[in-house]
């Protein structure tokens, strides 16, 4: 075989694989955009009910078309405190089932329609003004590219010389012996670890099987290996995250490794069982033989059966399994606070789901501001310095600075891609809210700094001034809680009450300032004392203003 012939084959394989992977990406992004609202509801509905969590994991991965994306997302959610370990394990079990949908899509005998689907969908995608139509066309464009990519790769392998050569190479790893099964599983694992896409590995496996280069047994063994290889993505995503996030990643690894290891000794029985099952279902496939490719359907059955059996085994053992993972990954000695130390770049591929995580981090900011206000109230009423609580307030303010920066950077990167209009608007809204909450934390700290300044200069607030400040703090803290509750419940009718309460707080603050000026004119307080007290009043007013801004964003006014 000449160099030009080899070059032509390599170009077809590389080009076909690239088109296939890009097709998977477009199909995923299009389906996410069309089903974005449902996806967000699904992920928010995850509970400790193991079956429900598993079903949601299956559905999300079936839509997203990538178990890697789902597991990366889960690790991120656990790291940010959005999910518990039990919930994460349930979703991961479901993700393993959901990822098998890829093989079933490829099993459809519509490869010859790949190019026409691609062409028609491209026109709608490029020229349609309707957003939903555009993203539906994008998903279909992805489907067309998947099949066109597979056809291109398949054509490269159809050359007799290439077919014979590759058949000879894979004969060395023929899965007709136990050792051959191990070698094929290892190859599938390594290939998936390198490309970090089980869809790519199974796509190539199916093309090789369709071309007769590898037998069904070898294809089945490769599929077993890719189930271990796909766990590398979650492992990489867990680096530098919280203990629970690491546990979620390790749970995925342990589940897939154990699931593969116990099946290898009975591999030949399992494959024979799939063959027998396929023969029993032949009547169904015979009715639709024009629509299904037999060898691909059998590979899909191997993949689905493997993950379905393992999920059914592990589901009743989820709690003991979680305890095992907790022992393997013990708690860190230092206290962990959930904040954004992690946002994997792959999350940018799932904006419909990534926006849920950033929303959770926004609620972390809201709850932190409430805590800071509560702690500041304790400092205000105490007659003794509360240095531990003061340290917490300063510490949380630093955390919120970092969280705000990371939310803005992440959302800014996310909205530069193909993002639906509703996700774009929500991202902008969240960036605005993150800025408002960070400003709120700054003004809470400014009040604390005023109190510390008084203490360091051995100054004491007048009894009346101290009482007024405590009363004003209570009103502003309650106002912040009310606005946060509206954000949690998505209450867009909050603005009327927020404006009314804001005016009342402003009047109250002006009254306290006038009373203070009267005390100053009567020499009941010192000028330095007066300066610090006035600054604290202004800081409370700014807190109230930022809380009102949040209410306006919630109501859709800004």
Image: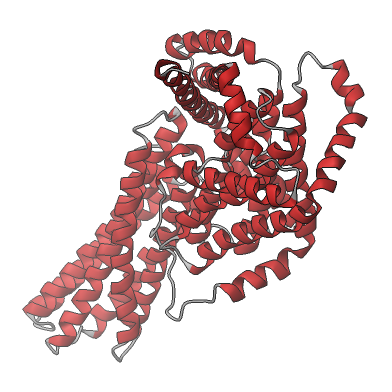
Quadrant position of residue 41: top right
Residue 402 appears at what percent x and percent y?
30, 59
Give the x, y percent position of residue 9: 48, 20
- Residue at 30% from the left image edge and 63% from the top image edge: 441
Residue 557 point in image, percent of width and height: 37, 37
- Give the colour scheme shown: secondary structure
- Residue 345's quadrant in the figure? top left
Lateral position of residue 362 relative to residue 141, left or right:
left
In the visual, does 181 lie left or right of 413? Answer: right
Q: Which residue is drawn at 92% across and 22% down?
A: 283
Q: Is residue 36 above or below residue 6?
A: below
Pick the front one: 52 or 150: 150
The residue at the far front in this view is: 1
Identify the residue at horizontal 68%, vertical 28% (top origin).
Answer: 209
Q: Relative to 245, does residue 70 appear above or below in the rendering?
A: above
Rendering coords of residue 95 (x, y %): 64, 46
């Amino acid at each position: 075989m000449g160099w030009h012939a080899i070059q032509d084959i390599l170009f077809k394989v590389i080009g076909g694989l690239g088109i296939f992977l890009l097709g998977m990406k477009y199909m995923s992004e299009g389906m996410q955009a069309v089903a974005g609202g449902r996806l967000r509801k699904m992920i928010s509905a995850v509970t400790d009910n193991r079956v429900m969590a598993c079903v949601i994991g299956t559905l999300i991965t079936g839509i997203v078309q990538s178990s890697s994306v789902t597991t990366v997302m889960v690790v991120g959610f656990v790291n940010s405190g959005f999910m518990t370990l039990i919930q994460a394990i349930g979703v991961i079990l479901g993700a393993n089932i959901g990822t098998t949908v890829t093989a079933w899509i490829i099993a459809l005998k519509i490869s010859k329609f790949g190019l026409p689907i691609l062409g028609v969908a491209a026109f709608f995608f490029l020229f349609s003004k309707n957003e939903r139509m555009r993203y539906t066309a994008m998903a279909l464009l992805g489907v067309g590219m998947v099949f066109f990519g597979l056809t291109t790769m398949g054509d490269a392998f159809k050359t007799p010389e290439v077919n014979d050569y590759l058949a000879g190479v894979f004969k060395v790893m023929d899965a007709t012996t136990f050792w051959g099964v191990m070698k094929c599983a290892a190859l599938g694992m390594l290939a998936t670890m390198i490309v970090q896409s089980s869809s790519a590995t199974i796509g190539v496996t199916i093309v090789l099987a369709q071309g007769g280069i590898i037998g069904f047994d070898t294809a089945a063994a490769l599929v077993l290996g890719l189930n271990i290889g796909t766990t590398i993505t979650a492992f990489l995503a867990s680096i530098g995250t919280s203990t629970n996030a690491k546990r979620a990643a390790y749970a995925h690894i342990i589940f897939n490794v154990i699931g593969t290891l116990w099946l290898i000794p009975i591999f030949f029985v399992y494959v024979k069982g799939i063959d027998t099952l396929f023969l029993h279902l032949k009547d169904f496939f015979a009715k639709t033989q024009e629509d299904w490719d037999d060898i691909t359907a059998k590979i899909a059955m191997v993949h689905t059966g493997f993950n379905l059996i393992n999920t059914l085994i592990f589901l009743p053992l989820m709690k003991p399994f979680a305890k095992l993972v907790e022992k393997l990954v013990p708690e860190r000695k230092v206290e962990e606070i959930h904040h954004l130390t992690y946002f994997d770049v792959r999350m940018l591929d799932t904006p419909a789901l990534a926006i849920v995580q950033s929303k959770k981090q926004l609620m972390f900011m809201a709850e932190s501001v409430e805590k800071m206000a509560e702690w500041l109230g304790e400092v205000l009423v105490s007659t003794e310095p509360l240095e531990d609580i003061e340290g917490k307030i300063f510490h949380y303010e630093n955390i919120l600075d970092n969280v705000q920066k990371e939310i803005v950077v992440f959302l800014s990167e996310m909205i530069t891609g193909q993002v639906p209009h509703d996700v774009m608007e929500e991202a902008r809204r969240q960036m605005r809210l993150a800025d408002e909450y960070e400003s709120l934390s700054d003004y809470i700290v400014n009040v604390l700094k005023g109190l510390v300044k008084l203490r360091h200069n051995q100054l004491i607030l007048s009894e009346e001034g101290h009482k007024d400040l405590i009363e004003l703090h209570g009103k502003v803290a309650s106002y912040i809680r009310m606005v946060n509750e509206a954000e949690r419940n998505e209450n867009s009718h909050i603005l009327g009450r927020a404006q009314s309460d804001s005016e009342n707080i402003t009047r109250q603050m002006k009254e306290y300032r006038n009373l203070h000026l009267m005390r100053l004119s009567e020499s009941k307080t010192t000028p330095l004392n007066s300066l610090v007290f006035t600054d604290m009043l202004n800081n409370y007013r700014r807190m109230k203003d930022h809380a009102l801004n949040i209410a306006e964003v919630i109501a859709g006014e800004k």
